[in-house]
Image (cartoon, rainbow, N blue to C red):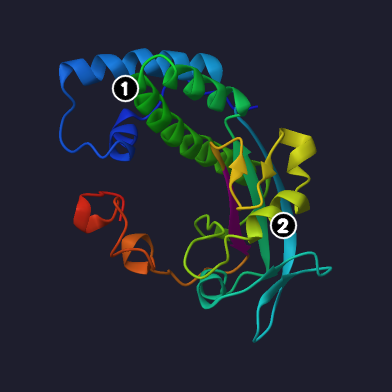
Amino acid sequence: MITLSAINKSEALRYMGHKGEASTALSDILDKCEKLVLEAVRPAYVYREVSLIHSDENISVEGGYLYLTGKDIKRHLKGCDKAVFFAATLSSSADTLIRHLEAEDMTMAFAADALCSAAVEQVCDLAEEEIFSANSYNFHTRRYSAGYGDLPISLQNEIVTFLNAQRRIGLTVTDNFLMIPRKSVTAIIGVSDRELQKTIVGCASCNMKNHCAFSEKNGCNRA
């Protein structure tokens, strides 16, 4: 079970589009919202290890349950004979909190939304730590999500179904491929017994690098 004791406020500020140090007033709002978010969220995740079959056309999960298409995911999983599929969520209580704040104070709602976005990434990081502590993987890639590069966003629904995430952590996908609860993530991590070739990460490898508000040229420090 994952619990959060604090949220990375620098990341929350990035999601808010804020550059530089936060003012005293903004810091106070973030502190107040952080307390509300930490009290509200119920982090949870599920994962499943699978064998991969590489072909010229795609990468398939053994048994034909899933097919990963696109050049980017093939490059990302090059050299991986297995992968970990996982889904993480802050639970519906995060959505409920944000909606409640939207009815009372949009500034607080905006800050809470950004804090939740930062929090779910922390949950993913903690989930990875637990997964790799429990399993003896020698090498692994970074996590890669549907919608990155040329991996279709429509794969979200298939991953959620594959993980039985609706029953296990209450995660569903809309007809427009949005996840409910909103503060949720699905991802794929390649694993291997052999050392993996390093791939380009960050803005340099992203198809949206010229349009994204969080790109390196717009002040993102995660590229």
1 vs 166, left or right, is left
Residue at 61 percent of width and 44 percent of height: 179
User: Residue under circle 2?
Assistant: 158
Instruction: Please tell me whether residue 205 is drawn above or below residue 188 in the rendered image.
Output: below
Instruction: Name the mark on residue 107.
Output: 1
Residue at 66 percent of width and 55 percent of height: 84
**Which corner quadrant of the image does residue 68 belong to?**
bottom right
Decide which of 208, 50 is in the foreground and name it: 208
CA distance separating discs 2 and 1: 36 Å
**Which corner quadrant of the image does residue 59 belong to?**
bottom right
What x and y, as percent, mark residue 103?
44, 18
Query: Dot 2 surroundings within 10 Å: few (below 14), some, or many (20 or more)?
Result: some
Residue at 28 percent of width and 65 percent of height: 210
Decide which of 34, 113 is in the foreground and name it: 113
What x and y, as percent, mark residue 91?
62, 29
**Which corner quadrant of the image does residue 96 belong to?**
top right
User: Dot 1 lies on which element?
Assistant: helix
Residue kind at label 2, given as amino acid type: Glu
Q: Quadrant of the N terminus?
A: top right
Residue extent of the magenta highlight:
185-192
What x and y, as percent, mark residue 3?
56, 23
Residue at 20 percent of width and 58 percent of height: 217
Decide which of 30, 51 is in the foreground and name it: 30
